[in-house]
Image: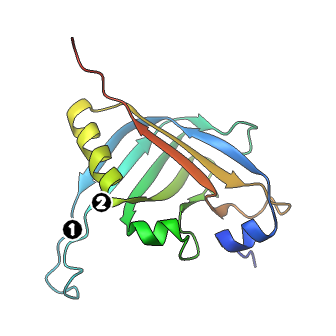
Amino acid sequence: MRKHPSLAEVLESKSDYEWLTINVSGFTVGDFVDSENEKGSVSAPHLRLLSRYSESDSGTISYNNGVVEVSFINNDDLQSLKGEKPIGSINYYDPEYTGVSININKVIYEHIVNCLVSSGSGVTLKVAFPLLENSEIKCLPLMKYQIVCKRENEI
């Protein structure tokens, strides 16, 4: 059985990493509200970035379609790397479809949503995943990410 490593395990092993530039082709923003959920968890808003063909720098990962689940977390949790995959994760078991999740603080989350809604594009996302000896493991914690939202104003 494959064990998916936590970020702490990857950092302890001093793994090298590889960058994947995700080609964002669209997005979805939505919410699922359920009155039967526990108070404080009634609303579950989401932001998903849709991705077309992307390939990592050395070709370890390549896929035709993908989705990036963007979640906001408490800035203190992000700064202290709290949890198994505090920055996010990547799952590339399916060669045609890759799933990525990233955790960002609420301020950046709101800026990204505003940028997407107003411009419809302009988001660049790069993620760094660890290179492990066991190439069968394809669900990995992210080690780094860079997300930039560019909006050009007409002059």
Task: Give the amino acid at mark 1.
Answer: Phe
Q: Nearer the viewer, mark 1 or mark 2?
A: 2
Question: Residue 77's mark?
Answer: none
- Position of 59 with respect to 121 (left or right) is right
* Amino acid beneath label 2: His
Q: Please report the residue visible at 50 percent of the width from the left and 66 percent of the height from the top.
A: 79
From the top left corner, tell me how far across and down residue 32 is, in percent.
21, 68
- Camera-side residue of 108 and 115: 108
Which quadrant, please, contains the N terminus? bottom right
Residue assigned mark 2: 46
Give the crowd class for mark 1: few <14, some 14-19, many >=20 residues within 10 Å: few
Q: Which mark identifies residue 32? A: 1
Is residue 15 depicted above or below 96 in this figure? below
Q: Are marks 1 and 2 in contact (CB under 8 Å)?
A: yes
Looking at marks 1 and 2 on the same chain, the residue that comes earlier in the sequence is marked by: 1
The percent coordinates of residue 150 (x first, y second) are 36, 30
Q: Position of residue 42 (x, y in %)?
A: 19, 78
In the orientation shown, which residue stands out farthest toward the right?
133
